[in-house]
Structure formats: structure tokens, C-alpha cells
Amino acid sequence: MPSKEEILQQKVAELENALRRKQVEMSSIQQIGKALSSELRTRNLLPLIMNEVTRLMNADRSTFYIVDEERGELWSIIAQQAEIKEIRLKIGVGIAGYVAKTGEVINIEDAYRDSRFDPTTDKKTGYRTRSILCMPIFEPLKEEKSRPSIIGVLQVLNKADGVFTKDDEELLASMAPQIAIAIINARLYSALEQKVAELNLLFDIERELNQAYTQEELLQIVINKIT
């Protein structure tokens, strides 16, 4: 039977190990935050989020879905060999769709024992989903809103050393605000790029209209610019 001193030493060692893990996690989260804040294009941002989350969670893969409320869908992009493919899911369908609809955090040890799991993708790809951790990403709360909107869903698959724990849930939740801000910034940047493109188009049309002499020339300039 271990002595009190041995038990105390074991407890101290466990606490030191736990502290080192937290320090590594906090350092990783800071690095992820820097990486996310440096990328403003959504199609570059999504793979960055998925790669960093997969690494930090010690998982096999992850997918970040953006909520498209107008279409009632979630969408993301995935890399298949050398091809980038867009994927879309209906809100309410599958685990990610369920989370987008309810705002709940879902932690499943065995996907095929959960009735909400949709195995369609597994059947198409040959992949075998086991454990799932799925979390909503909420829009930063605005003063005029009583509750935040869900702008994304982060889904992590197949923990390398077993199942996802409560600590994993807390770790993922600690990343959620940074991810939300990155997505909002990417949306604003995309809207700004579109507005600049529209203004440039109008400027080009105005410049060429000033050089046109006939009605036919004016009409042809407009057609060329908008097609």
C-alpha cells in the first residue's frame, strides 16, 4: 500500500501534467487566433480552421460549416485529392444540421448508435465515422438582439485515442469566439470586395460612355460590361 508521501507525490505529478497540458492548449489557441485573424477570404479561412482544430483536438478530421439561412443550408468546402469541392447540407439533417437548428453541443461516442446521424457521406466515401463532437458557432451578440444567431457549425470526427471528453468540449468552446470573429471579418471583407468591384465597373462604364458617339456604341458598351 502506498504511503501518504507517495500518494502526495503522485497527486503533485498529476497536477503538474495537467498544468503543462493547459499551457500547451493555451499557446495553441493563441497561435490559432493569430492565424485566423490574418486570413480574410472565406475559402482560405475554412481549411485553416479545419486543419488547426483537427490538430488541437487530436482528431482524424473536422469540418466547419457556414450557415446559409436564406437557403436553409449549411455549406463548407473539402479537399478531395487535388480538387476542392463544396458540400451542402440541409439545416436539421444529420448531426451538423441538428446542431445548426437547435444550438446544442453534441458529443457522441458511437455515431451509428445515434438516430440523428446521417451515414450518407460515409457510404459515398467509404469513411467510417465513430466519435463526433459538434458545436454551434454563434454570432457575437449585438445590443439589439436578445439571442445570438448561429453562423456556423464546427464538427470534429474520430478522436485518435478514444472518445471526446468534457475537457475537449471546453477546449473547443474556448476557440469558438475567435472563429466567430474570423467568419464575421471574412464576410465583411467579401462584401467590401464586391462593393469595390461594382464601383470599378461603374467607373469603367462611365469613362467609356464619355468616349462613345452613337446610341449603338453606348448600348454595346453597357452590354460588354455586364456580361
Image (tube, rainbow, N blue to C red):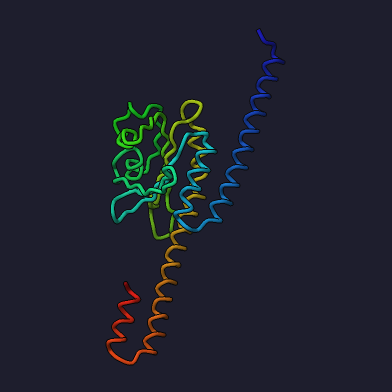
The spot of residue 20 in percent (x, y) is 65, 33
Q: Residue at x 44, y 46 (%)?
A: 82
Q: Is residue 226 above or below residue 10?
A: below
In the image, farthest residue toward the top: 1
Q: Residue at x 39, y 89 (%)?
A: 211
In the image, farthest residue toward the bottom: 213
The spot of residue 212 in percent (x, y) is 35, 89
* Relative horizontal placement of residue 99, taking residue 164 as reference (left or right): left
- Front position in the image: 192 or 107: 192
The spot of residue 160 in percent (x, y) is 50, 29
Q: Is residue 84 above or below residue 201?
A: above
The spot of residue 65 in percent (x, y) is 39, 47
Q: Is residue 24 above or below residue 202?
A: above
Q: How many marks?
A: 0
Q: Residue at x 29, y 56 (%)?
A: 70
Q: Is residue 182 above or below residue 64?
A: below
Q: Residue at x 65, y 28 (%)?
A: 17
Q: Quadrant of the C terminus?
A: bottom left
Q: Quadrant of the N terminus?
A: top right
